[in-house]
Each structure stands twice: as C-alpha cells, then as structure tokens.
Image (spheres, rainbow, N blue to C red):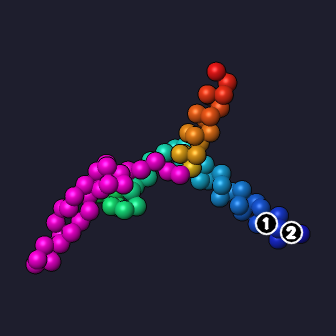
Amino acid sequence: MTLTLLAIACLAAVTLCYAGLCAASPFGRCRKCHGLGFATKTDRKGRPRRGRPCRRCDGNGIRIRTGRHLYNAAARLHRDGTR
C-alpha cells in the first residue's frame, strides 16, 4: 500500500514540475536540429557546413513543448465553448 502511494506521489511531483516548466518556458529546443535552426552536413573534406533550414521548426530552432501545446488546446476549447 505504501509503495503505491509513493509511486503516486512521485508521479504527481513529476507532473507538477513539468507543468511548471511549461508555464515558465513554453518553448524548447528543436529535437531535429538541436536548436540550431538548420541541419549540419559535411563537405568532402569532412568539415561541418551549414545545411538547409530545418523543416520541423522552420529554421527558428525552437518548438512549443508538448505540455504547453496541450494546455493551449484545452484553453482554446474552453474559450470557444463559453462564448
């Protein structure tokens, strides 16, 4: 019984920390380009070169976090439903 309560408490703590992170910093680095905004490629000599702009983040290097995206969708649904 106590192990279950400990697991629930840990899960609640992780959820609250992630919610706080999404509230404080709604944008994170792009996972595909690692926040650079472009893909790196190498030339024939092996030196890194700038590639094309990242398609996932449109060259910005940042993307909205999943938790913030869910919060925005829920807030939009509530706002549209109460008008």
* Residue drawn at the location 40% of the way across and 61% of the way down: 31
The image shows residue 42 at horizontal and vertical percentages of 17, 72
Give how far apart the Cα atoms at labels 1 and 2 are: 6 Å
Q: Which residue is mark 1?
A: 6
Nearest the viewer among 77 and 66 is 77
Can see residue 21? no
Q: Amino acid at mark 2?
A: Thr
* Badge number at residue 2: 2
Is 78 situated above or below 43? above
Is 81 situated above or below 1? above
Q: Is residue 3 left or right of residue 46?
A: right
* Badge number at residue 42: none
Disc 2, SS: helix
Q: Quadrant of the N terminus?
A: bottom right
> Are circles 1 and 2 on residues that touch, CB within 8 Å?
yes
Start and end of the magenta stretch?
37-66
What residue occupies the far right of the structure in this picture? 1
Q: Amino acid at mark 1?
A: Leu
Q: Quadrant of the C terminus?
A: top right
The image shows residue 58 at horizontal and vertical percentages of 31, 49
